[in-house]
Image (cartoon, rainbow, N blue to C red):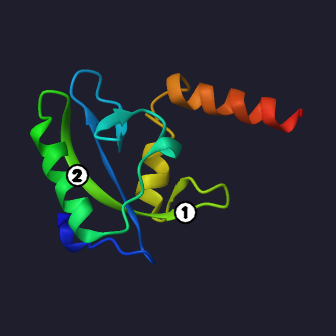
Amino acid sequence: MSKGFTPTPAKPAVITANDLRLGHCVWMRDGGWTADPREAELFEDEAIAELAMIEAIRQSNIVVGPYLAEARRGQDGRPEPTHFREAFRRRGPSNYFHGIQAELAQSDTEASHV
């Protein structure tokens, strides 16, 4: 397993990597990749996570640097980061306000007006 971390039901994980062409952070979902970390697949079983990691590594024409990152199941059932590094990666590049950062701010603004 990646970095000595073994997912369990008490400490699930997601698989994350960077898109090879764009460099953006992506998360594994159903053997493919999503730019939305809330759509990531949560792995609670070591064997299933290991098979998924093998599949992620085989997709070197799509992503680079896949690894398991500890996560938790949020109140809505979707994955949430447990480490500041992963929370930071979810927000996208920090060099200027664009892309994911702008989209998240827009969705937060829309949600607060409901």
Using a 10 Å C-alpha cutoff, classify the residue at mark 2 as few (fewer than 14 neighbours), some (14 to 19) or many (20 or more).
many
Tell me the SS state at disc 1.
strand
Residue 21 is left or right of residue 35, and the answer is left
Image quadrant holding the N terminus, namely: bottom left
Tell me the SS state at disc 2.
helix
| The quadrant where residue 64 appears | top left
| The quadrant where residue 68 appears | bottom left
Determine whether 3 is above or below 61 in the image.
below
Of all residues, the one furthest to the bottom in this rendering is: 10
Query: Considering depth in this image, is 107 or 44 the residue closer to the camera?
Result: 44
Q: In x, y percent, where is residue 45?
A: 31, 69
Q: Amino acid at mark 2?
A: Ala
Task: Give the number of the disc on residue 52.
Answer: 2
Image quadrant holding the C terminus, namely: top right
Q: Which residue lies under the disc numbered 1? A: 73
Q: Amino acid at mark 1?
A: Arg
Check contact, mark 1 vs mark 2: CB within 8 A: no
* Residue plotted at (56% across, 26% down): 97
* Residue plotted at (22% across, 47% down): 66
